Every structure is written in C-alpha cells, then in structure tokens.
C-alpha cells in the first residue's frame, strides 16, 4: 500500500466515488466482497474524506487504516520508506 501510485489513489479512492453506483471507493467495495470480517476496515475506509486531503495524505491514511486493521507494528507500515513522516497516522489509541 505505501507504494501505491498517486494515480491509483486518485482512481480507486476519489474517482470511484463518482463512477460507482453506491458512491464508494473501490477498496471498500472489494473488501465487502470478502465478508464481514473486514467490516471494521471497510468502515474506516468509508470514513476517510478524500476531498480535503492531498493524494499523499490519502495514501498515508490508507496505509494507516490497513496497518491498524491487520495489527502490524508501525515500523512495518512503510517498509520501503516512501511515505513522508510529516503526515502522521491518526491516533487510534494503539501503543507505538
């Protein structure tokens, strides 16, 4: 997810709200098809507001949502070091 291109972020997360029948992003639609065990992640993705953030910030929020859901240690969320550290993950009460 950290290596997701900004074009892909735009297409699958912003443009999808315009082109899908239920006005959701492609990721939450796809995860819904995998069953209720992903409901918490789907809710997190649906709660992200893509219209007041840059594409880099949206990518960071996506990485944070996935990393938190799969309970990965924070240092594993960006193993390639491609995300700017100036965009913090939302504090979800997890120890870091």
Image (cartoon, rainbow, N blue to C red):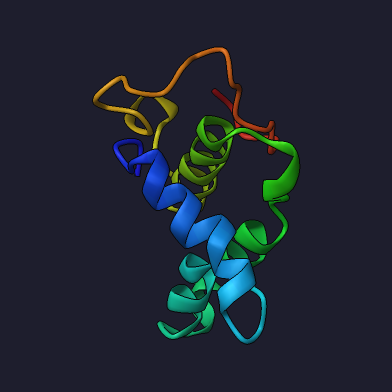
Q: Quadrant of residue 88?
A: top right
Furthest residue toward top: 86
Look at 66% across and 66% down and name the residue there.
43
Look at 33% across and 41% down and name the residue there.
5
Image quarter in which the C terminus is found: top right
75 or 27, nearer to the observer: 27
Look at 67% across and 76% down and name the residue there.
23
- Using the image, determine if residue 53 lies above or below residue 47: above
17 or 94, nearer to the observer: 17
Look at 34% across and 29% down and name the residue there.
78
22 or 37, nearer to the observer: 22
Q: Position of residue 12 (x, y in %)?
A: 46, 61
Q: Position of residue 13 (x, y in %)?
A: 53, 58
Q: How many marks?
A: 0
Q: Quadrant of residue 73?
A: top left
14 or 1, nearer to the observer: 14
Q: Position of residue 76 (x, y in %)?
A: 33, 31
Image quarter in which the N terminus is found: top left
């Amino acid at each position: 997810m950290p290596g997701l291109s900004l074009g892909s972020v735009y297409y699958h997360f912003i443009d999808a709200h315009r082109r899908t029948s239920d006005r959701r992003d492609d990721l939450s639609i796809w995860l819904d098809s995998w069953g209720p065990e992903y409901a918490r992640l789907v809710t997190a993705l649906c709660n992200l507001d893509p219209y007041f953030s840059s594409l880099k910030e949206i990518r960071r929020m996506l990485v944070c949502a996935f990393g938190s859901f799969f309970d990965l240690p924070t240092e594993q969320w960006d193993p390639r070091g491609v995300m700017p550290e100036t965009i913090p993950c939302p504090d979800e009460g997890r120890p870091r």
